[in-house]
Image (cartoon, rainbow, N blue to C red):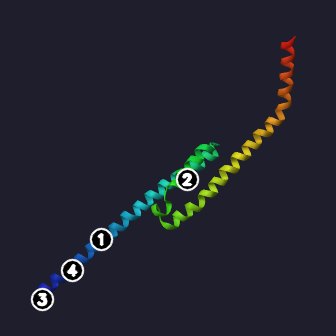
Amino acid sequence: RELQEEGREVLGAEQAVTQLQRSHKNIQQASQVVAECKEVLLLCSAVKKSTEERRYQSALHGIEQLRQLNLRATLSPSFGRYMELAIPVQVEMVKEKSVGEFNEWLSALRTAAPKVGEVALQQAQESAV
């Protein structure tokens, strides 16, 4: 009888250890996924900051780094899929902002061109005299 009771205690302890080992493994895997997600989110944050600061080349470089990551294999499948869908949206946003800024620059240039031409003609006339 004593032997049976001690056997049950050992079996219970073994089951508890096995459960703790599973829990530990799950926590390690979750920690790894969180660290990988953090890296991707930091890169996304850098892309957003570059875009806001009108550093479009830097933003596109960050987007390219995101594209190079195998997001689905690295991250949890749902988060990886979300990130894969977000990349084209980011590219389009950078494109729209850079084209808009370029168009504003062209408009300002069109506005200033007559004055620049006038000043250039005056200087040419003055240097010819």
Please give the name of the residue rendered at 85% of the width and 28% of the height, measured from the top-left corner.
Answer: 115
Identify residue for label 3: 1
In space, the residues marked 1 and 3 are separated at their CA atoms by 29 Å
Q: Which residue is mark 2?
A: 44
- Whichever of labels 2 and 4 marks the residue nearer the N terminus, that label is 4
The alpha-carbon separation of the residues under discs 3 and 4 comes to 15 Å
Residue in the picture at 83% in, 22% down: 120
In the rendered structure, the answer to whether residue 99 lies left or right of residue 29 reads right
Q: Residue at 30%, 71% (x, y): give it.
A: 20
Q: Amino acid at mark 1?
A: Leu
Q: Give the CA separation, mark 2 to mark 1.
A: 36 Å
Front position among marks 2 and 4: 2
For discs 3 and 2, the disc positioned in front in the rendered view: 2
Q: Amino acid at mark 4?
A: Leu
Residue 40: percent from left, percent from top: 50, 55
Of 68 and 26, which appears nearest the observer? 68
Q: Earlier in the sequence, mark 3 or mark 2?
A: 3
Q: Nearer the viewer, mark 2 or mark 1?
A: 2
Q: Seen from this angle, which residue lies furthest front? A: 128
Residue at which label 4 appears: 11
